[in-house]
Amino acid sequence: MKIIYFDICAVPIFLIILIATFIRKTIKGHANQLFILLVLISLFAAVSDVIMECSIAAPPLEEKQVIIGYIFGYLYFLTRNATILIYQFFLFAVTRTGMRVQEGWKKFLMSVPYIVVALIILLNPFTRNVFTITTENGYERGPWILLLYIISMSYAVVGTVYICACKRFLETNKWIALISMYVLAYISVIFQFFYPRYLVEMFATAIAFLLVVLIVLRPEELTDPDSGLPSYKAYKLEIEKVIKMKQHVQIVVTRFTNANEVRTYLGEEVYNNYIFKTSEEVRAMLKKHRISYELYYERPGTTYVVIDDPTFDVIGTFMDTDNRIRETNREIEASGVKLNPKICIIQFPGDCRTLEEIIHVGHEFYGLMSRDQLVTQASSIVGLRDYQIESNIVGILNKAIVERKFEMYYQPIYDLKTGKFHSAEALIRLNDKKYGFISPGVFIPAAEGRGLIVPIGDFVLDDVYRFISENNLEELGLSYIEINLSVAQLLQKDLPQKIRNLEKKYGVNSSKVNLEITETMYDTIGDVMDQNLAELYDRGYTFSLDDYGTGYSNIQRVAKLPLSIVKIDKSLVDNMGTLHGLSIMRNTVRMMKDIKLNIVVEGVEREEQLNFLRAMGVDYIQGFYFSKPLPEAEFLQFIREHNNDEKVTF
Ligand code: C2E
Ligand code: MG
Ligand code: MG
């Protein structure tokens, strides 16, 4: 009598694996689906084995037992041998080496040994070469059973060699889990050879599958929990593999530019469903074209489709699905809500070479497309100057910091009461050797986002203090110079100390400097920022609130800060052409005057704007109407000319 407990144990393990794959939603994608098939077939094999062994356990057998033994014996041999072939295809899919056997004939060739096995088994009723079951003797092995073993072991050997060859682009733990299938197969076959009573093969397979489920198909990490689609992290891992294997692929990045708004409007659940259905249509379309692909999703609204065929006409085919997508989401579309896609097609390795480049293009392309442009090629994005600056900004800024490539310009600020220039704003400039002049509107936010603003801010402070010390502001008729401060600078504990050091180094008094802060800063106001503002205020510094009117202006918060000046943003000036805009400006000015703040209006370019603002009682004007920001020497010359007592120039 055989020991079948191991086989019986394998059954619940397979069942648990199946349930787990569904609960963990690892059901999408080629590799996952092959794995499910693999587990299903193994489950079938284990159950067949158990039934067969039970029916033939105690000869002499009844006729009925012989028939059951035969039926489940055949099923067992057919399914058991199929698993080892499917496992090979699973390996192709999971290591992304599948394209090498994409053609039908190659798949067929790989399946030939199995087909031979199947034929041998199917012919067994006539040849009785594999096994026989008789009422008297029960189950007996035939001479060809060894052949079956040899063939399936040859699959295992090929598979082992293959997976060893794939080692360099697999993480070690995954590699171990994948190869365990073969290692356990060898061990169990040898074990069973010496102890034929113990049926351990299916149990060994079940253990190997457990390892695969736990280690290889890591769904929590690689599946987006909301939509159930493969995640952005899975995408990055996939691209790493593509790069290591020097594979040629097309990546279609679709960014829904209004994803956040649509999600807020529809609610999380409906939105996720919408995304899911939309991507299902894309999947169906690619499947119809027999294209090997994988689709990934990054919240809140970017999908990546990696297509193994570099020549596939993506655009033509994607456009075709548009109607189907509408049809599937009819209810949502009928309500007038629609995701706005922007699509970028990346050819690898043609357009981008590294993971960083691919990721970067995928994140930046839509900002560089024109409004009504739907599709772009990565090659045309990568060539843009703005894109190159954006992607090389860290290098550019680091170089500029080390080589002191920054320069301070000064934009005069006009006093409407005295008709003289009363102060100036210090504005940083960067002239890169390769890219030329780069706007602070571009590099300041980039530096802030990458933790590089503090050294830049240090340069600004040092250079402006030097400028003040070298020139007599009073003599020039200037009260102070305004310096822009970033949040990160205000969050530094040692900011007051730094400023104190500069005062000493250059002999500059705090009254000569006005510090500009922006409204967005209050959200992050913390103890350090509060303390810094308070300490600097106590030491005699004044503060301006920059860019008023661009953020979520909150007058209560404004009133709480130690401000002396508010700078009204250019956007409010630009809108003064309409009655509405004029009224907003008038009321803003009135409100600021009520809370006793001095007002600078920025971005004044035309005389009529100036006249309106003068009539409203604005104190100071900064804008191209008077002067653009100027380099130090030109600025000094400009001020000397215009603040000259004899001459009234404006
Ligand atoms: P901001 O502080 O609001 O500076 C005013 C911006 O408006 C300057 O742009 C100035 O050139 C521009 N401007 C002034 N009048 C006019 C006008 O009449 N027409 C037009 N079209 N523009 C006008 P800029 O120099 O390009 O600086 C952009 C932003 O970069 C600044 O906005 C500020 O947020 C930041 N920034 C500049 N220098 C520094 C700095 O040294 N440190 C920090 N942290 N940020 C800086
Ligand atoms: Mg400013
Ligand atoms: Mg401003």
Image (tube, grey):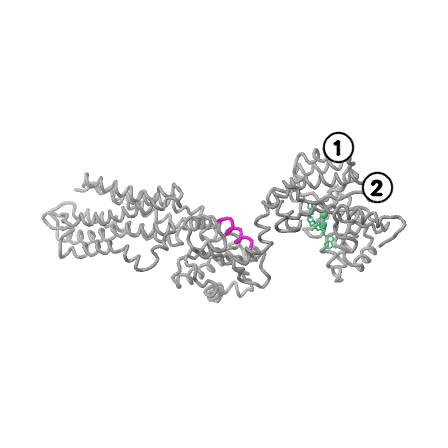
Mark 1 secondary-structure assignment: helix
- Left or right: 104, with 243 as reference point: left
Bounds of the magenta segment: 354-364
Of the image marks 1 and 2, the number of the one nearer the N terminus: 2
Mark 2 secondary-structure assignment: helix
Query: Which residue corresponds to mark 1?
Result: 504
Between 399 and 280, the one lying in front of the other is: 399
Q: Amino acid at mark 1?
A: Lys
Quadrant where the C terminus lies?
Answer: bottom right
Please give the label number shown on residue 474: 2
Figure quadrant of residue 120: bottom left
Q: Position of residue 302 (x, y in %)?
A: 51, 55
Q: Position of residue 175 (x, y in %)?
A: 36, 43
Q: Position of residue 288 (x, y in %)?
A: 39, 63
- Left or right: 343, with 64 as reference point: right
Q: Main secondary structure of the magenta part?
A: helix
The residue carrying mark 1 has its beta carbon less than 8 Å from ligand 1 = no
